[in-house]
């Protein structure tokens, strides 16, 4: 896949104006639905029609292990990745339970879990078992970085070919907040202390160690220029699951459909995707705010404003699930509300 040859279609300004006019004509005070109206207008621009549907939909979760866990940056042992991948397929993780509640399918893709065991129900797209320890050497080869993004792109494209009208992206992988922090720090040219957070609720002492690991990894990789190849950043300090999420985000933008992103990990994936293909953020809907250190900085860079703040930090794509009722609500409003014209009434400001 030649990502540098992708040309993305702009949002339909005509349909966005049509949607706002349609909302203004409903039997309610103008703009009284707040950010629901903002979301509806955005969706009209993406779908290029005011008569869209947000079903069926699926959440694509990419799972892999990260060699940097050897440096003690995570409170959760590496073995959890494989265990939770199967639990997710069986509907027993946070994102799976929420997907069931909000009528979303969920699929899990092994792009680098450190296990040779068969994982029932998990799609095997394994690049290799785990990345390297990025503190000591590049996390992966350049070819593997490209492959991670290509896998995500193929998976995302296939999800839409199968009839889904929107996708969500999620991840599973111990140590991946360290990789996400390093990617963001490299692409925004920031020190580790500006972006590194507690991830799996590590202690203050371990947080300071995690910051040092990120800074030293960036120094090892010589990622200190503003003109960075995003695939080189992924090669040096990234993770397979973040690369694959980036590919799925690019696929949604290329096809012209919305993609719901979760928290900090998906911010890193979106930043990477935007550096690979300019304009992908037009198709990205940021669902909830992550309170990981550095979130506000990367969201500002991406010009994204999340819709909800539930203090969630589960990951997996769970936050993205929480916006699905909002989307269903928009469809119901457009379908069922009376218009001012029907009521022969006008709200006077």
Image (cartoon, rainbow, N blue to C red):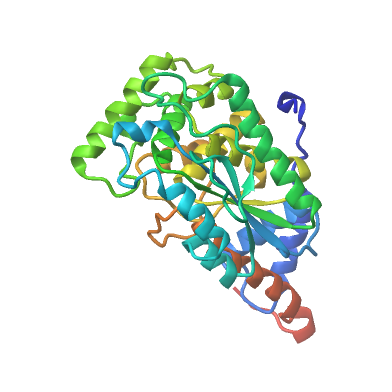
Question: Does 80 sit above or below residue 216?
Answer: below
Q: Residue at x 64, y 77 (%)?
A: 28
Quadrant for residue 17, please give it.
Answer: bottom right
Q: Nearer the viewer, residue 5 or 58?
A: 58
Task: Report x, y in % for residue 53.
Answer: 75, 65
Quadrant for residue 149, please give it.
Answer: top right
Task: Report x, y in % for residue 259.
Answer: 64, 50
Q: Would residue 169 be visible to someone looking at this image?
A: yes
State the residue lying farthest toward the bottom: 343
Whether residue 176 sits left or right of residue 324 in the image: it is left
Where is the N terminus found, in terms of image quarters?
top right
Task: Report x, y in % for residue 219.
Answer: 36, 16
Whether residue 92 sits left or right of residue 22 in the image: it is left
Q: Residue at x 40, y 40 (%)?
A: 177
Q: Would residue 191 be visible to someone looking at this image?
A: no
Q: Nearer the viewer, residue 11 or 196?
A: 196
Q: Residue at x 76, y 47 (%)?
A: 158
Where is the C terminus found, in terms of image quarters?
bottom right
Q: Nearer the viewer, residue 149 or 14?
A: 149
Task: Report x, y in % for residue 197.
Answer: 32, 41
Q: Residue at x 75, y 76 (%)?
A: 335
Question: Does 163 sit above or below residue 127?
Answer: below
């Amino acid at each position: 896949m030649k990502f540098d040859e992708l040309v993305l279609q702009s949002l339909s300004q005509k349909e966005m104006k049509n949607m706002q006019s349609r909302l203004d004509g409903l039997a309610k005070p103008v703009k009284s639905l707040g950010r629901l109206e903002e979301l509806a207008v955005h969706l009209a621009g993406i779908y290029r029609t005011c008569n869209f549907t947000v079903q069926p939909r699926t959440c694509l979760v990419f799972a892999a292990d990260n060699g940097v866990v050897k440096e003690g940056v995570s409170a959760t042992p590496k073995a959890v990745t494989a265990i939770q991948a199967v639990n997710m397929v069986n509907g027993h993780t946070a994102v799976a339970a929420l997907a069931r509640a909000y009528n979303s399918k969920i699929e899990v893709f092994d792009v680098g879990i450190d296990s040779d065991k068969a994982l029932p129900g998990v799609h095997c797209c394994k690049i290799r078992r785990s990345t390297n320890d990025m503190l000591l050497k590049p996390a992966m080869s350049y070819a593997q970085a490209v492959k991670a993004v290509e896998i995500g792109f193929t998976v995302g494209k296939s999800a839409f070919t199968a009839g889904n009208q929107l996708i969500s992206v999620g991840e599973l992988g111990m140590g991946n907040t360290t990789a996400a922090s390093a990617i963001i720090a490299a692409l925004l040219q920031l020190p580790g202390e500006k972006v590194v957070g507690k991830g799996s609720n590590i202690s203050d002492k371990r947080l300071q160690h995690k910051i040092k690991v990120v800074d030293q990894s960036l120094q090892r990789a010589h990622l200190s220029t503003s003109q960075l190849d995003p695939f080189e950043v992924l090669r040096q300090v990234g993770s397979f699951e973040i690369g694959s999420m980036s590919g799925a985000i690019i696929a949604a933008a290329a096809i012209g459909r919305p993609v719901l992103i979760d928290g900090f990990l998906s911010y890193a994936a979106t930043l990477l995707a935007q550096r690979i293909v300019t304009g992908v953020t037009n198709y990205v809907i940021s669902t909830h705010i992550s309170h990981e250190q550095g979130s506000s900085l990367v969201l500002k860079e991406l010009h994204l404003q999340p819709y909800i703040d539930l203090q969630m930090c589960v990951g997996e794509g769970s936050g993205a699930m929480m916006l699905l009722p909002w989307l269903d609500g928009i469809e119901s409003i457009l379908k069922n509300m009376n218009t001012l014209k029907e009521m022969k009434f006008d709200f006077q400001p």
